[in-house]
Amino acid sequence: MLEFAADNGADAALLQATADIATAELADHDARIPVGKYRLLVEAAKNACGDPAIALHFAERRDLSRFSVVGLITLASPTMRDAFAQINRYGRLVVDPGERRERYRLEHREDGLWLIDSLVPPDDFHELVEAAFAFMVCGVRAFSQSTFVHHVRLTRPIPADPREYARIFGAPVDFGCTENAMRMDAAWADYRVAQAPRYVFGILCDHADAQLSQLGGNDRLTGQIESLLAARLHTGDHGIATIAREMGVSRQTLYRRLRAEGTSFAALLDGLRQRLACSYLDGGKISIEEAAYLLGFSDRTAFARAFHRWSGMSPRSYRRRKQDSPRL
């Protein structure tokens, strides 16, 4: 948002000072800008640019994948149904409102399928909801011109120019409603997002590909399993039953074959996570919390416990030690 506002004529340094955002917070991949500061930034950007709908325009004109791993993860999803699940799983990496429940839900009603945002915007910060909806709608337009949103309901009071909302969402918009929701096309859940989802996810995790290339022959059973795991870790659906199904064998057969090779599914999963964790942290391009989600952990705390078991130190200490190490 800071960069977007500056591109539209605002003084970035003044916006940063108004929102009380330190330069170190922007430079640190592990830092999270509090929602209160982000609201100050959005309000200052609206005034500086003379654009009351700047949050909508930000979502319309900026690809989420440019500045958040969440954008790339959703692009790696085969269908909108899968992308929706990933948005619920990873959404806190973009904005963390402090709630731990799933933010979005789907409801089948008499008049159709509705996507509902359960977030109650803190201090009437309606842009949190509006921008999220706009990212969803405008993001889909990048690969499909199909109309999949038919109606939008927003709790915010009617804005100065409601026509801009209708233009961006491509559907009628009601204001002052009791919920924030969008009525979706019935076929929405099955819309294709990416023609080659694993390839897109591979762009996100190029270091994971490098790790797998060092396994010494993916024709081996362990290599095949690790390849499948690497592509599924971020989804949270990476249990032995899932992998066995993808390989076309029973869970029991896979268990026996791994035992014959002197290993186990749990050991393979743990070893892969450890190697990828070190690769993520060495790269320095993503935050510790993002690494936790990409590795399939429920949260940062669970990841930190596992990483301490592997290395005897916290992820932050590991990253700091790597950064402080002398370079040859």
Image: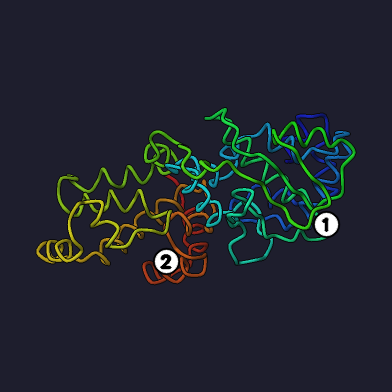
Colour approach in the figure = rainbow
**Quarter assignment of residue 47:** top right
**Label 2: how many residues lie within 10 Å, few (<14), some (14-19) or many (20+)?**
many
Q: Give the residue furthest to the left.
A: 260
Disc 1: which residue: 124
| Count of number-bearing discs | 2
Say whether residue 223 is left or right of residue 234: left
Pointer 2 or 1: first along the chain: 1
The amino acid on which the numbered mark 1 sits, given as a three-letter code, is Asp
Residue on which the image places disc 2: 307
The 10 Å Cα crowd at callout 1, few under 14, some 14 to 19, many 20 or more, is few
Asked where in the image residue 145 lies, by quadrant, the reply is top right
How far apart are the two marked residues, 2 and 1, measured between alpha carbons? 39 Å
Q: Is residue 260 above or below residue 185?
A: below
Along the line of sight, the residue nearer the viewer: 278 or 37: 37
Q: Name the spot of residue 226 as percent of width and height, x first.
A: 27, 53
Q: x and y percent of residue 139 in the render?
A: 59, 36
Q: Residue at x 78, y 58 (%)?
A: 178
**Residue drawn 74% across the image and 61% down it:** 120
Q: Residue furthest front?
A: 110
Is the residue 80 above or below the residue 225 in the image? above
Residue at point 87%, 49% (across, down): 157
> How far across and how far down the image is residue 161, in percent?
87, 35
Q: Secondary structure at mark 2?
A: helix
Seen at 15% across and 45% down, the residue is 219
Q: Secondary structure at mark 1?
A: helix
Snapshot quadrant of residue 237: bottom left
The quadrant of the image that shows the C terminus is top left
Q: Are marks 2 and 1 in contact (CB under 8 Å)?
A: no
Amino acid type shown at disc 2: Phe
Q: Nearer the viewer, mark 2 or mark 1?
A: 1
x and y, in percent, of residue 158 in the image: 87, 45
